[in-house]
Image: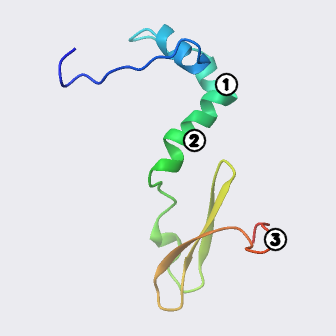
Amino acid sequence: MDMMTPAKIIDPSNPIDALIAKQRSGVALAQDFYLDPAVYQRDLDRVIRRHWMIAGHVGSIPNPGDYFQVTYDRDSVIIVRDREGEVNALINSCRHRGAQV
């Protein structure tokens, strides 16, 4: 392995790593990659929740008070244009009850 090739860390006792180890190059992913809840949770933890996500376009909220909501898995966010015209993103959760706003 040269310096440009990342090391592959495979734990054969981990079911997801076992799926990855069996995957052949140039072949469609095994059905479990699409259906297994553990694979979905791992994607959420390692990709979705670690990086910025596109929620929408500011053109969707041209006026103060305009808003829209986006949901990624169980996470809900409200995007709103405030009185000064700035765009803000807020977690869609009541602080004292935990319910969606």
What is the crowding at mark 3: few (fewer than 14 residues within 10 Å), some, or many (at least 20)? few
Q: Secondary structure at mark 1?
A: helix
Q: If you read the primary sequence from the N terminus, does the residue marked by circle 2 or circle 3 appear first?
A: 2
In the image, which disc is placed on residue 68?
none
Nearer to us of marks 1 and 3 is 3
Kind of residue sitting beneath label 2: Leu
Q: Which residue is mark 2?
A: 44
Give percent across and percent down for residue 39: 60, 28
* Distance from Cα at disc 1 to Cα at disc 3: 33 Å
Residue 96 at what x, y percent from top left? Answer: 78, 75
User: Distance from label 1 to label 2 (Cα)?
Assistant: 14 Å
**Which is nearer the eye, 37 or 25?**
37
Asked if marks 2 and 3 touch (Cβ < 8 Å), the reply is no
- Do labels 1 and 3 touch, CB within 8 Å? no
Q: Which residue is painted at 39% across and 11% down in the image?
A: 25
In terms of depth relative to the viewer, which is nearer, 34 or 45? 45
SS category of the residue bearing label 2: helix
